[in-house]
Image: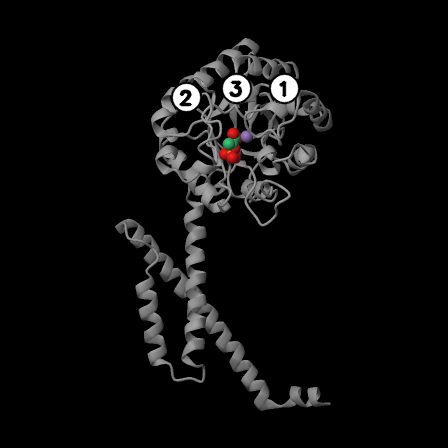
Amino acid sequence: MPDLLNQDDHELQNYRLKIDELNDRLLQLLNERAQVAMQIARRKAVLGLPTFDPVRESCMLDSLAGKNQGPFPDETIKGLFKELFGATRNLMNVDRRRKMLFSRRHHQSNTVIEVNGVRFGTDSMVLIAGPCSVESEEQLDAVVSHLAKCGIKIVRGGSFKPRTSPYSFQGLEMDGVKMLRRVADRYGVAIITEVLEPALVSAVAEYADILQIGCRNMYNYPLLREVGRCSRPVVLKRSFGATLEELLLSAEYILSEGNTNVILCERGIRTFEPWTRNTFDISAIPVLQRETHLPIMADVSHAAGRRDIILPLALAVKAVGAHALMIEVHQDPANALSDSQQQLNLSEFDELLAALGKDFMNNGPEAGAEYEAVQ
Ligand code: PEP
Ligand code: MN
């Protein structure tokens, strides 16, 4: 009964109509305000001024509180407007992100990068494998000959090693890079290796087919700019503490210097979980594929830090549609000079290959069509 009464109460009906009308006006005003704020942001960009102006925001809040006649208390008014300021900033970030070189918004089809006859960015996954560190020519020969026999076209091996402790094995540096090149040439495979500092980029690029920026250097802007000026493809690894937006902005440093051949690599992020070395962020892969046209790689070895779960993680990477997978393989993991817990031995690698299926080898120029933009 009370509901029926309410329906018939004219005064209540009028108030409801008034609220609807006010909602419509507020909606229009909110969007009008957002339009003006975006015009301000564009003008500031032209003038080279920062978009976010916390002093102006705080003045606006004080002024609004000064004019406020209730019934909302000043703090509530401030809270509501802070929410509005935040939403406006988000809108500007999305707007800015769409204009970035990494964005799918203006580059809808996947960037395809070809190295040694295999293509990153198509429907079929590229598999990269090799030891954590370059240790000796014999070690490389044992691993690379096996990988080449399996059909692997790109091998990995670190020779400038960014170790947590300065007393751990630091790598064979340029000697190791040259050694990796020699052995790779023996078996007709390409190489990817890490470069740690800007001054060494051109020297390493002379020998490497792909340069790797390790997770610890994702924020090393001079290094990013330097690899951006060279012509080699770059694998940029996500820092263990970086958001996906930060990863994309680091890629933008490389792209903005003219190097368009950037591959992004998810390699696990640091969480509270101690049973894996890092937490593998599988959702990063489809999220990145929506945001960017750049190829996406996954390094499950550094994510897991343990060899017993490499296989299921690799299958998950394939299932989620990553463009490339990187796996650490060593001929004698127990005696490896770095990351001995996570490297697969040669027969474990064979098992992984069998589980993945051989279609990853079929990613030459004739491989499946590039898929079009997700949005
Ligand atoms: C590596 O791939 O050799 C490496 C050191 O990985 P990350 O930078 O991801 O730790
Ligand atoms: Mn390693």
Point out the image quarter for the C terminus: top right
Spatial separation of the CA atoms under disc 3 and disc 2: 17 Å
Q: Which of marks 3 and 1 is nearer the N terminus?
A: 3
**Residue 338 appears left or right of 208:** right
Kind of element beneath mark 2: helix
Mark 2 and mark 3 in contact (Cβ < 8 Å)? Answer: no
**Residue where numbered disc 3 is placed:** 135
Marking on residue 204: 2
Closer-to-camera residue (318/214): 214
Spatial separation of the CA atoms under disc 3 and disc 1: 11 Å
Marking on residue 331: 1
Residue 278 visible from this viewpoint: yes
Check disc 1 and give the amino acid type: Gln
Closer-to-camera residue (137/108): 137
Q: On the image, which quarter does residue 91 sit in?
A: bottom left
Q: On the image, which quarter does residue 132 sit in?
A: top right
